[in-house]
Amino acid sequence: MPALLVEKAPLRCTLQFSGKPSGMNRISFRLGMLIGFAVIVLLLGGAALRSWLVVERLVEQSRTSSEQAIQLTAAIQELAERTIDIERSARQYLVLDDPVFRQRFDEHLALSLALVDRLDTLAAEPLSPLLGGWRMVSEALKGGLEKRISKGELAPLLGRLVELNGLLKQAGQRWIEAEKTRLLEDLEANRLHLGGQIALALAGAFLVALVMGWWLVRPVRQLEQAIIRLGANRFNETITVGGPADLRQLGVRLDWLRQRLSELETDRERTLRHVSHELKTPLTALKEGVALLREEVPGPLADNQREVVDILQHNVVSLQQQIESLLSLNAAAFEARRLRLARVDLPKFMASVVQRRDFHAQSRHLKVLVEALKLDNVMLDAEKMAVVLDNLLSNAIDFSPEGGEVRLVVTRSDACLHFECIDQGPGVASEDRLRIFDPFVQGQRQAPAQRQGSGVGLSIVRDLVRAMGGKVSLLPAEKGAHFCVELPDEQ
């Protein structure tokens, strides 16, 4: 590649702060996560506790209602049995006029009235009128026995008691059904209420998670982007990180690192320029002096003197190539920071790449074949990609045997563009595969034709491909070298 000398102004870097940090920004990353998880646990735990208390209350109500229903049914059943005993003892007393039967009547009546009182306490509202009527009929029955009424007058009173017992049984069933319905309605209302509370708790927890995620993930993403920019040598963009205090402090440290790296990069480039310039000036004088000696301007040279002059000229040319390679590598590193994507007509672009190496290929009697089927317009940095393909094609031509062919294959798959350069040369030795892209590394296998190079071409290829967001690799091949450049397909 021709030598490029790039003048680069030193970057001035300043730390920027966005004013006084807010209350949220004064909280550390760990404390923020702890607060977020605590709020989520409180929301979900509160909803779970509320659900447990409601379920406990409903279970208690159900247990109480069941017990009352059992007691109510048992009391009504016992009252019916006592009524039969009252009727039997009353009839026996009227027939036999025996005080024992009257005593039995009084005992059965007292037990029955106790049952009535218990029923009144269990379900006063629906059974109260019937229980009041039962008391009135029992008082009338007791008074009738004291007056020694006839069996005909006793029968309606006893029949009324039996009728009231039936009505009490029906009313008890209605009360049980009403309690059951009330419990179901209460259960349904609490179910909807609990569902709403759980939904609100989940929504609140989700909202808290979103807020904490935004508050914590955003600065992490900023840190990631800052590190990517540092890795891409983009030192002119100030690093600012928001969020928790410790992440903001980390952003300040990264910005300090950016400034330091920028200063080191500027110093490196300045030193390289100065060293290259200082070397080229005496080297030019040395080259001219050697040329004068070779042309025997000072005077004729003996054979041994001419041999020394040839050695000097060879080393001067080699040193000049090394200096130009350093400048080329420095220029490529500078250009790698600038990405200029544009729509490119791929067939015309590949034809121009091949045309640049047309005379080179003809001198080796080689055919350069381009395979780019079903591809027309693609998004590329044409300038950088042209340098990449030119370096790969130059190496392929140098290492290919005369009369052979070099293939340039372009394909698209998995949202990527693949540019492959395949030759029929000796390939790359296994011990050179891992370091073939390092600067100033030349493989052990020699090219068939004499070539001059310093081993920076593939290093430039790697740097430019990385700048375009891709990767270059050496693929296994039975014969020759097979290089593949993979770039993201920016459609």
Image (spheres, rainbow, N blue to C red):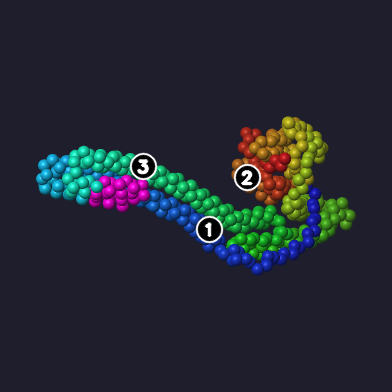
Q: Residue at x 46, y 56 (%)?
A: 46
User: Where is 173 relative to 336, above or below?
Assistant: above
Badge 1 amino acid: Gly
Q: Main secondary structure of the magenta part?
A: helix
- Residue position marked by numbered label 1 in the rendering: 36
Q: Nearer the viewer, mark 2 or mark 3?
A: 3
- Kindly identify which residue carries mark 3: 174
Q: Earlier in the sequence, mark 1 or mark 3?
A: 1
Which residue is identified by label 2? 432
Q: Amino acid at mark 3?
A: Arg
Q: Whole-Å distance between the Cαs marked 1 and 3?
A: 53 Å
Magenta segment range?
112-139
Question: Could you say which is closer to the camera, residue 373 or residue 490?
Answer: 490
Q: Amino acid at mark 2?
A: Asp
SS at badge 2: helix
Rate crowding at label 1 as few (under 14), some (14 to 19) or many (20 or more) other CA atoms within 10 Å: some
Q: Residue at x 41, y 46 (%)?
A: 182
Residue 306 lies, in percent from the top left, at 81, 51
Seen at 43% across and 51% down, the residue is 51
Regarding residue 315, the answer to whether it shows in the image is no
